[in-house]
Image (cartoon, rainbow, N blue to C red):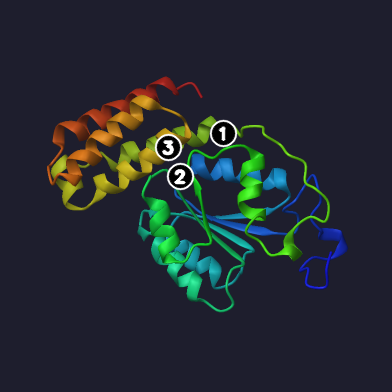
Amino acid sequence: MNDQSPFSPLTSPSAARPLLGMTVLVVEDSRFASDALRLMCVRSGARIRRADCLTSARRHLQIHLPTVIIVDMGLPDGSGAELIEELHHASPRVELILGTSGDDFAEDSALAAGADGFIAKPYGSLSSFQQAILSRLTEGYRPTIARIADNEAIQPDPVALRDDLMHAADTLQETPEEALKDGVVDYVAQFLGGIARSSEDASLLSAVQAVERARKAGQMPTADVAHLTGVVQDRLAQTATI
């Protein structure tokens, strides 16, 4: 541990717990994705806090300054890029700002807004998560001995997945015309796209992408939204016994 280390000997990172002593704020509306990050943080020794929207994150940041913040790019009250840009210019600055999304084009937006890096959904192994953080932190935050590589895949709570599907189903109960007018479908498609990638659900992802293609073409995808709603209801029926 060098003179610049922010840790005391009791909270210094170790090979088994390389994020010990750090606090990670996760700004994520999906409970399923949040649970995956929670498990990886806990296994790595980090404390974790969660905000499910921009408003909640800003409220938290008025009181606490985390070591690391992981910001989902699509949130119910705006784009994660807004928060990343604010954090990038803030003083004092969060040590490490990371964007996250399942959208192929979101990484460019996160980096342009000032993020130090990006973690794509679905999340990989515990080892890859730790590397995404440690490789971007200053030397004082890193373990003094080689960390233990752990390539185990993290399995989030299936109840969290069901909660996400129920949230999407409730949001889609508006008529397609009202949902499109209010931008609800765009948000739900992004939300479900992340869930589909994280849970490796190809059929759900295909239904999401059909809606996204139609929206990009300027169309009102009433039939596609109805199909997506049906797929979500099917998933809820399949998980009814959880």
* Residue 157 badge: 1
- Secondary structure at numbered mark 2: loop
CB under 8 Å between discs 3 and 1: no
Which residue does the numbered mark 2 point to in the structure image? 30
Q: Does residue 175 appear anywhere in the picture?
A: no
48 relative to 165, above or below: below
Q: Amino acid at mark 2?
A: Ser
Q: Quadrant of residue 77?
A: bottom left
Q: Does residue 184 appear anywhere in the picture?
A: yes
Q: Quadrant of residue 167?
A: top left
State which tag comes first along the sequence, 1 or 2.
2
Which residue does the numbered mark 3 point to in the structure image? 195
Q: Amino acid at mark 1?
A: Asp
205 relative to 40, above or below: above
Viewer-side label of 3, 1: 3
* Residue at x 23%, y 51% (from the top left corner): 183
Residue 192 in the image, given as x and y percentages of width and height: 36, 38
Residue 150 in the image, given as x and y percentages of width and height: 71, 36
